Amino acid sequence: MLLSPTDRAGGTVPGLLAAGDRGEPVEPGDGIDAGGIFGADPRQSIALDQLLAHERALLDALVEGVVVQSIGGRVLEINDRALELIGCELDDVLGRPLPLPGTRWRDRRGRLLSPSELPARRALIEGGAVGPMQVQVRHLDGVATLEMTSRPLVHQGSLEAYAVVTTLTPLEQAAEIAPGEDTLARFRLGFDHGSTGMALTEVSGALALVNPALSTLLGRSEEELLGCCLEEFVHPDDRAEGGLLVRDLLAGPADSGRVEHRYVRADGSSWWAAADACVVRGADGAPRWVFWQLQDVTERKREQAALDYHIAHDPLTGLASRQALERQLQAVFDRARASHGRIAVCFLDLDRFALVNEGLGHLAGDRLLVDVAERLISGGPQGAVAARFGGDEFVVVIEDVADAEQATEAAEQLVGLFAEAFFVGSEELVVTASCGVALASPNGGPERLLGDAGVALALAKRRGGGRAEVFDPSLGRVVADRFGIERALRFALQREQLHLHFQPVVELVGGRAVGVEGLLRWEHPSQGLLEPSEFIPTAEASGLIHEIGAFVVEQAVAAVTRWRRQLPGCSQLWVAVNLSTRQLSGGDPVATCAAALARTGTGPEALRLEITESIVMEDIDASIVLLRRLRDLGISLAIDDFGTGYSSLSYLSRLPVSSLKIDRSFVTGLAEQSSDTAILRAIVGLARTMGLELCAEGIELAVQRAKLAELGCSLGQGYLFAPPMPAEDFETWVLGRARSAPPSPADPGAGGRLDAGGGRSPHWEL
């Protein structure tokens, strides 16, 4: 089926360019195909040749240029006017694609155009008319500025194109287009039969020309539309945007633009259109007409709306999603700045929610989250925005908050929503929630506010959960300090800022040093020497503890290996290091210790590991399995800070430990008459019953040493003997004690002398 009418003064152009007032369709016979241009059937090529030959005279008589191209882009026919406009001879162009070699085709901005950007190619791709498009053609004879409009030729009763026809109009002619004039005929090329709604309006907006597709889209006849303003059919809520586009285009400098808005049909239903407007100017540059193309994009808008809803809402609970929360929070901030109001954010987290998933399954957990969302909506502060932040975390944003007291009341109201039990299926669940609330600071933003509320939430969790906490700036400083420590700690190892200090462990009767405890220190570049309590919690929280723990074992084993070989009286010296919770539960201390011992060639008896009671009891069965693996390696194990935890025979008898370390809190009271003596006597009795070695920590006074020795404690460490010191200072300490008496000839390697009874003198031997 041929594409459009070409009405002209004095008659119509028949055949290829259509016939009759509206242009009756031309039958292309069996289809048109020529020598691989259209296909393989030679009859189609003959039919086209006959058709073109018949109409050649009429084509040459046109004042416009006309080019017919195959779907592959090769020129099949071209009239004399077109040859003149693009500056070429007939033999040069037939069978060849446009643009021709030696010519330059540019758009109105001067950019070179490729064949795929010309209207002919776009018309085939889009399946409808494309243009008018302003093109500057530079050839040997000069430069021509043209307007090009292309339209595909299709088989009757089919949408399949077999060629494309393009009209070329000099710009000075195109600029004078007016309804009723002969040159309007080029607009009819594809106008009447296009699937896109098209219209030509006066500058005032009145419709001067409409095509059947637009009539169908608007649900009104051509007669009902002509003379009316196109804006009348725009949805009332969308008219401002469309009117603004037209005003901007008429004012210049741009001649074209697009707006997407709704139009209303005669039956009252609405549809979305992508409306492209192009201003047609006269020779004086003044706007004469506005050409509109309206494409129905209702389905795309519907799909986009569904996608937007999916992005903006949590699929499980229906609350606002995290992405939507961030956008809404920014909008709330903007309103607050304009009105000088205050904003509060409540950050909620369900306490021990993992137990629900583990005990009842994830479907039950999802059902609980849905019920929580419903309570937040129905029972939360009026006007608040609730969102699911992720997992079992929710955020509630409250506007126009008077002060911190009102924010606290809102947070407590939210926590109170969990006082009533939840029912998930047949299960009745008592669930609590922790809440952190923060008020927006004058210089803060949405991200800062969420972070502050998160810090307050963490405090509520640490204080047992089921409560609300308000953010205080001091909390922010603590978090900032913790973040700074973590960041610096990551570089501390590679910059050799971590070191071990060693404190001797001595026999209380005699003073012989039998071992050392390796204690980690951080030589911070700005804060000086930091003890483990100041950075180990951060190392555990960040996961750095495993790398640091391996470093401690490596350094401790290397040091004790050197001392065993080089220092007098230290051939049996051992070193003790501490294991943290994260090392025991998440790492592989067995592999770490085995690797360190293997690298130095030291026996496992040179290494002891100390674990606190609380760490063991977090998961006693798993702890026992791991401790037995360490014991099987030959490493001695000790319970550190004994007496502060469970201290019961029921678990102690199951642990593969060889010694107990008495916590310093029991040692401190020995200088006075206190109940600590009775406690220590019980601990000593327990150790004897279990066959365990005892070591007391924190000995600072001679009276404490004497009392412990009297009770039956064999080992001790503390400032009475020596403080923790760097490795080189420990070596000096050892050598200093060794020089206090001459070596014994009976054991020259040990560095001590024999007393009359054959034993070593206790006052200096290590």
Image (tube, rainbow, N blue to C red):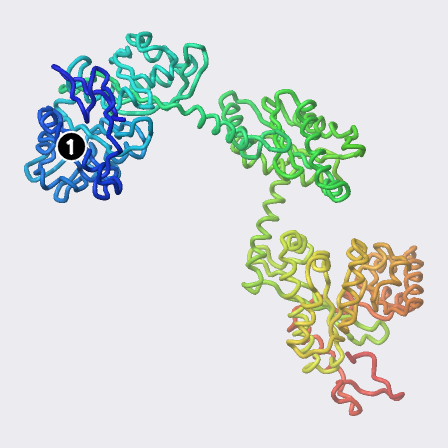
Is residue 240 in view from this perspective? no
Please state the total of marks drawn on the protein image: 1
Q: Quadrant of the N terminus?
A: top left
- Check disc 1: other Cα within 10 Å, few if <14, some if 14-19, many if 20+: few
Q: Where is residue 446 in the image (x, y as percent from the top left)?
A: 54, 33
Q: Position of residue 575 (x, y in %)?
A: 73, 71
Residue found at x 65% / y 74%: 558
- Res 211 → quadrant: top left
- Res 652 → quadrant: bottom right
Residue found at x 28% / y 12%: 207
Q: Say which element carries label 1.
A: helix
Residue found at x 71% / y 26%: 413
Relative placement, left or right, of 742 versus 279 is right
Tell which of 198 and 584 is nearer to you.
Answer: 198
- Res 386 → quadrant: top right
Q: Position of residue 44 (x, y in %)?
A: 23, 36
Q: What residue type is labelled 1?
A: Gln
**Which residue was labeled with disc 1?**
50
Q: Is residue 539 above or below residue 364?
A: below
Tell which of 323 and 86 is nearer to you.
Answer: 86
Q: Where is residue 108 in the image (x, y as percent from the top left)?
A: 20, 32
Q: For the view shown, which residue lies furthest in the bottom direction?
A: 745
Q: Quadrant of the C terminus?
A: bottom right
